[in-house]
Image (spheres, rainbow, N blue to C red):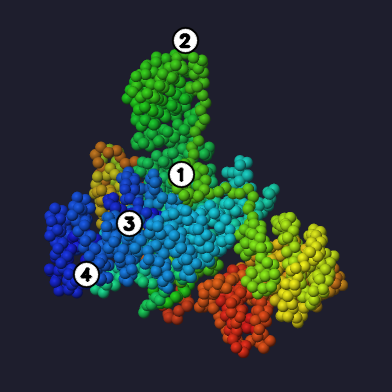
Amino acid sequence: MINSLFLISHSGDIFLEKHWKSVISRSVCDYFLEAKEKAGDPENVAPVLQTPHHYLISIYRGKLFFLSVTQTEVPPLFVIEFLHRVADTFQDYFGDCSEVLIKENTVTVYELLEEMLDNGFPLATESNVLKEMIRPPTILRSVVNTLTGGSNVGGTLPTGQLSNVPWRRAGVKYTNNEAYFDVIEEIDAILDKSGTTVFAEIQGVIEACVKLTGMPDLTLSFMNPRLLDDVSFHPCVRFKRWESEHVLSFIPPDGNFRLMSYHVSSQNLVAIPVYVKQNISFLETGSCGRLDITIGPKQTMGKTVESLMVTIPMPKSVLSVNLTATQGTYTFDLTTKVVLWDVGKLNPQKLPNLRGSISIQTGAPKPEENPSINIDMKLQQLAISGLKVSRLDMYGEKYKPFKGVKYVTKAGKFQVRT
Amino acid sequence: MTTMQRLLQLPVNAVNIVKTVQSQVQGQEEDKSPVLSPDSGQQTWYSALQPDELRHLRSGGTGGGGGGGGGGGGGGDQEERGSQEDGGGGGSFQSQPLRHDDLKEMLDSNKDSLKLEAMKRIVAMIARGKNASDLFPAVVKNVACKNIEVKKLVYVYLVRYAEEQQDLALLSISTFQRGLKDPNQLIRASALRVLSSIRVTIIVPIMMLAIKEAASDMSPYVRKTAAHAIPKLYSLDPEQKDQLIEVIEKLLADKTTLVAGSVVMAFEEVCPERIDLIHKNYRKLCNLLIDVEEWGQVVIINMLTRYARTQFLNPNINESLLEEGGGGEKTFYGSDEDEDEDEEEKEKKAEAAAMAKRKPYVMDPDHRLLLRNTKPLLQSRNAAVVMAVAQLYFHLAPKAEVGVIAKALVRLLRSHSEVQYVVLQNVATMTIKRRGMFEPYLKSFYIRSTDPTQIKILKLEVLTNLANETNISTILREFQTYIKSMDKDFVAATIQAIGRCATNIGEVRDTCLNGLVQLLSNRDELVVAESVVVIKKLLQMQPEKHSDIIKHMAKLTDNIQVPMARASILWLIGEYCEHVPKIAPDVLRKMAKSFTNEEDIVKLQILNLAAKLYLTNSKQTKLLTQYVLNLAKYDQNYDIRDRARFIRQLIVPTEKSGALSKYAKKLFLALKPAPVLESPFKDRDHFQLGSLSHLLNAKAGGYQELPDWPESAPDPSVRNVEVPEWTKCSSREKRKEKKVEKPFYSDSEGESGPTESADSESDSASGSESGSGSEGSGSASESEESGEVSVSEEEEGEEEEKKTKKRELKKAVQESESEQSSEEEDRKHERKMKQRKSDSESESDEEEESESESSQSESDDSESEAEVRKKKKAAESKPPSKPVKKETKKEKKEMSLLDLDDFEPAPSPQVTPVNNLLSNSLVTDLEGLSLSEAVLSPATIAPSSALKSYELLHRITGEGLSVEYCFSRQPFSPDANMVAVQMQFTNSSTSDTKNLHMEDVKLQSGMRVKDFPEIESLPAGETATAVMGIDFCDSTQAANFQLCTHTRKFFVSIQPPVGELMRPVFLTENEFKKEQGQLMGMNEITEKLTLDAKCRNEHTIVQRVTTAANLSRVPCGSDRECRFAGRTVTSGSLVLVTVATREEGAAQLTINCEKMVIGTMLVKDILLALTQ
């Protein structure tokens, strides 16, 4: 399946290679680097490339390319999904998936890769299982290890590998037993010039942080599960129970994990929390333009809109902007030509406004299209779809855990066309 | 101490300097550090290094400084890289051997921490792609190191370099071989893993041996590793394929989810063409699927897709016929209505639709099983799994059901952009075939300005495919915003998309055309050019109407510089010059002027235009044409020169010009067919969706073609797991031969021998086979019958000698059953018996009655006549074997003297099991030899009355109808997972009972029932038997149903004793012990007991146990132990029973069974049987 993996930095430096079958020369990456040069933007590099003898399947994560080489037919999503899982694991182990951190932890990375694949076929990808085999580096442990000659490698077979709950390690113990669930909803929307909704939907995830002793069996039920149109689960969720009773019944992994993600049926009208009044225009004559944006609350369900952020990617011909914001600060990145306006809290009494002039390179034609406006925001203690967790029950263990549920609504891909 | 870690990345020279620097600065701390402690003469190598280091550093420039500063923190990181590159390049000559020396020394030390440090550096080198191969001898020594991390890193090193240093790698083999025997499963597994990863050809036999051994390891984890090792060995030495296939076959039968995914992976890499290996495991794989780890799921689903394509019929066969008839478009829309209905309704609908057709299609239950079991996986968090299920549904599901995958695929569009890319490619292919299913999700494919270009273009493709009369206005409005995008590639793609919409949907063609014409005044040249190209294609469809557009475009030639667009305009004008008679010559005039500066494709079109104008309007354009042709004559490009020469010859009439010039007009102004704007994704679905080949639209190496549906379904019974192998003709023959070779008496003698118990199982199977023809008259399949016939014919053609032997055997059976006391009597009786049989079978017992009623009786009669003849002959011609026979008979008699009246129906139940056991074995032997069922019907030999019968309906409550049932202990042939229940109906009323059948079956979930065939009429005073099958799902839950006659309905229920939920299997002593070894712990139940006074000999114990449970005896060396084995009927879990006897009736009963509930219940039952 996967023959080799190369980690390539943003600038094209191959800084790690790992082979699971015979060694493939790193010159194979040249095809990829060529394609990368051609594409310009790293996002635009085709994930699957064909070379005379190999197929290159790559992902772009954290300014890094994970490039896998395969020689035979393999479902491309299989490899892509696996590479993302590798990146997730790095993130889980080192806190972030970046070049510096990977270089710092080369040996751990190598040990991890060794466990994750055998002969190119995934072996152990569950974070709980991996952590039992290879302990994540901590400053304290590395001190201890250096002094005692101890190691990061576990000596026993992780129980998870063999049990029918491979995602949970055995013998979990906590003094404070707690289970937290974050219901996070994101609004994906496209609004047109006049402010009408072209397309809007709600995607939600439930992120869990469960620190419970033993083998707890949890049941999470919703007040209004009918809202959920399409769902996908962590493997721990018993699908049959969901089908019959619409409750989530599961033995949780230890620690942080994504319990489910869902999609709210598109029949429901999506509440759009803010409106945007905008006027961006480029003058026909003279190389300049005007910009005027006001944001106001629309359907906020009585909550305040926080962390409001407006991103406007300007046409390439824009030289500079000269704007004034009534609230928050704005920046203009000269290389990417992006205006970033950090508004902060939305005050309904005094609507934030950004206005001013844009100057364009002399001689350049008037930009064809007005830039679209991307909005980022957050509403605390609210799931915009109205989804509510009704209760969490625990079976199988005696103690009383602390349970907490938090709701957040965010803007996902929220775009206003101008 | 994080610096320590950072040091790992530093080149060793730098590290050493840091260390020395540190040691100077913080001398005391150094003492504590095991790495840097100055004992065992390490200080010397530090100092020894220093001068060399410095020399190198001096030449290396910045590197030294960086290394020195590295101790300060992360700042040194970048410089350090610089120094390393130096090392890898020119400076390597000096530095490489150096650092390796110090590493070697560290590896040789006896401190684990030093070794670990060294190994970490070496691994870091490997990770960066630096060569560390010269360290091989030093590293390989540490393969047996106690420290587990060192060991692991050594493994990493070995796997990387063993291929290059094969001889040295051999040094490590013995360590792994030792590891393979380790009691710790983790060590066994990792030893096998490394051993198989070392690509050294010499050790192939060792690997093979290790894999074989590991494949039958107790630990599923080791078995999984063995599965992983198979493709490794195969890639190393493809000649081992046959042996590996054997291992794969064995592992495929494994029941643990851990192994399933890995072994299917191995199967796919080694022998994907051996689809026959899957048959027996198909249902198991389907059922396990949901619990297999996600990566395994992907592989299994892909493989099963291929499997299903070879084994089942096309569920859309009727629709595809329709489609060919031309109604294809419309059927797409039908499917989305059905989407919200639940599956059952859909099924019904689909079925109903299919029934309506001439050739009714009924989905194979196994096909349905696959679809049902994969569906929940659409909810997986793993995109690859979702995609795998989606492609399975796309390729295998009936049209009405494919819709379910749309939602899941749309969900994946929220994922990473790479996932989106792949999913969109597949969606694009799907939307061409099944547009309806994605239409409700149209808006999910709307494009955001922030999407990467490649995603945008794919989304556009999907939107275009989804466009139809109803949604086109929305889509076009959406396209309009896209045209204004800053991303020019995307704009060009949008224009093409508009063109495609316009060609596909006639209603909007004019709107699109107008829109595109407006684009001609766009400022961006690329946009204009792309529009021109698309307009050209559109105009070609109906040029008459649009001469004004052509005129408009003619004007554009002044401005547009993009060659392709210019060429397109010129072609248009030339082609439709009759519609623009005034403008065309003028355009040519302008073009003639700029001819020399044009691009090649434009020049060619100018020539074309000139030629066409010359032919239609020679008066105005003659000179211009000649001028252009002259220019072209001296062009640099030979294509253009050629074209000019060719055109001149064709169009300008001269004396020399050939016959062709007459046809010049026809040649140039022929009606050209309008271009078809097709999706690039058309017909991509001949590649399996989700595959790499599909994505690249080219066959990738190792791609397995998705086979076409078969014309007619192959035999579905190959997937029946419970039916033993030998029902297949070939194996049956094999078996026959084997049996024939054996001296016949050895079989009849050793009643408790090993072969016997095997036979008792197969006998029951054979019983069902022959019985089903008669008992379940309606349900028996034709193929079965025909099979039997052919075999009996075969038998007829056999040699004389064999026949006589067979006859002897038959006799033995009959005798053993009838238990005659003397030879003469025996003979007489035998004859009598034969006579009886050939006269009418109805005399023997109830079961046979039904048989004689069945339609088969005619053919049976003739056959049995033949048998009689044969037997008579045998009786005369075979004296020598008789004494032996007699002896055995006598022995038997002694054992079971109590109650052996030959064919009296009700012998005491305690003894009959033995009787059964014995006779069964013989029957099977005979079954192997001759399959003429009339004589050897198992019913004759295993009288049903021997089995305990239960009352289902009492005479009084049943108003004259009484029903009894017993568990006939014969496999239920229509479905091997069912327990056969034989029912005996007695009508003791005064009137006939009609239409006896069952209705309204109420079952626990998972249970299934196969009804007995309706008994049309049961005259007063008569009895009838029928067999039904119940799948109790390995539970003792009752099956409730209504027994209906033409007048009444009775509620009845059948509850099985636990002993009837299993069927006997044959195991050898060794196999038994092995299986028992794997079913320890929770799966083992042990009870002490005191045997009943009457039950102290082995014989009675066997009797009682086999009466209590349908098990077969396992041969056993010790006479103090009796062993029995069976498998549960539904899940096939092993049930192993051991009764160990001690002095004075003390005994110990041990039951090993995966199903603990069954085990506990069985313990109770057997205890009861043995102590009473």
In the rendered image, which quarter is residue B1029 located in?
bottom right
Earlier-in-chain disc, 3 versus 4: 4
Between disc 2 and disc 3, the foreground one is 3
B1134 relative position to A394: left or right: right
Packing grade of label 2 (10 A; few <14, some 14-19, many >=20) is: few
- B914 in relation to B1095, above or below: above
Q: Which residue is mark 4?
A: B35
Q: Which residue is mark 1?
A: B698
Q: Nearer the viewer, residue B976 or A131?
A: B976
Earlier-in-chain disc, 2 versus 3: 3
Q: Amino acid at mark 3?
A: Gln
Check if mark 2's residue and mark 1's residue have beta carbons within 8 Å.
no
Earlier-in-chain disc, 1 versus 3: 3
- Of the numbered discs in the image, which one, if any, rests on residue B655? 2
Q: Residue at x 39, y 44 (%)?
A: A52
Q: Residue at x 41, y 71 (%)?
A: B182
Q: Amino acid at mark 4?
A: Val
Q: Amino acid at mark 1?
A: Ala
- Of the numbered discs in the image, which one, if any, rests on residue B1042? none
